Amino acid sequence: MYIHIKQYFDFVIALISLIVLWPLFVVISICIQLDSKGPVFFKQKRLGINKKYFYILKFRTMRTDAPKDMPTHLLENPEIAITRIGKFLRKTSLDELPQIFNILKGEMSIVGPRPALWNQYDLIEERDLYRANDIYPGLTGWAQVNGRDELPIEIKARYDGDYAENMTFLFDLKVIIKTLTSVIKSDGIHEGNTHL
């Protein structure tokens, strides 16, 4: 069954990616340190498989005094909180690269629902309807490539459920290819609360 093979596949791809990308990790780390005071990495409490908590790892893109448990698209004025290098890292999704370590630790998958913040109760509850909390969260996902921040929670959860129900190697491959296209175009990324 693919769900069991998928974990080995994720580990191998993550390990290869880390070996290939370590120079980029070094360059990004130096840029973050030169740009603003604070740590290179940012840890945040997220929901993992079967709603177990873990700490997701990202490159720090915000000032250390920014709100820590609020999705950035809900901030009224994110421009104040995001650092200069942070804007570039978020636009290119390079801030997500440290999640390779989460994959190697067995906390995440390459493809799956994006891990919800521990306090995103509405999203967590909606995903329960589709059993989308019962699988490993992903570095990228079906909802991510179909709208990302633009999607209402109900639609996002439905996409996550669709993936959970139809998980295959070809589906993963499709999501990865669409992710690369979305990253190049910066599709679906919104900084700040556009509904205010």
Image (cartoon, helix red, strand yellow):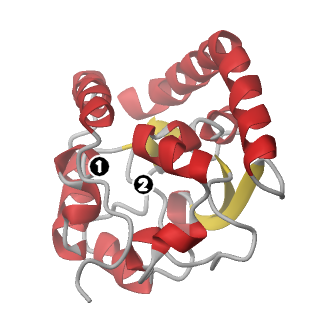
Coordinates of residue 151 in the picture (x, y in percent): 19, 65
Evaluate whether residue 156 shows in this view.
Answer: yes
Q: Height in image: 158 above or below 169? A: below
Closest to the observer, 159 or 151: 151
Report helix, strand or loop for mark 2.
loop
Quarter of the image for residue 133 reads bottom left
Query: What's the residue type where badge 2 is placed?
Result: Arg
Residue 13 falls left or right of residue 92:
right
Coordinates of residue 25 in the picture (x, y in percent): 71, 27
Label 1 to label 2: alpha-carbon separation: 8 Å
Q: Height in image: 61 above or below 106? A: below
Q: Which residue is mark 1?
A: 144
Structural crowding at the residue carrying mark 2, measured as other residues with C-alpha within 10 Å and reported as few (<14), some (14–19) or many (≥20): many
Residue at (39% x, 45% y) in the render: 112
Farthest residue toward the bottom? 196
Closest to the observer, 98 or 134: 98
Quarter of the image for residue 22 reads top right
Residue at (20% x, 56% y) in the render: 159
Residue 168 falls left or right of residue 20:
left
Q: Which residue is mark 2?
A: 114
Evaluate whether residue 52 shows in this view.
Answer: no
Coordinates of residue 184 in the picture (x, y in percent): 30, 29
Coordinates of residue 134 in the picture (x, y in percent): 43, 59
Q: Height in image: 24 above or below 92? A: above
Residue at (76% x, 54% y) in the render: 36
Q: Height in image: 190 above or below 25? A: below
User: Decide: marks 1, 2 in contact (CB < 8 A)?
Assistant: yes
Residue at (70% x, 36% y) in the render: 101
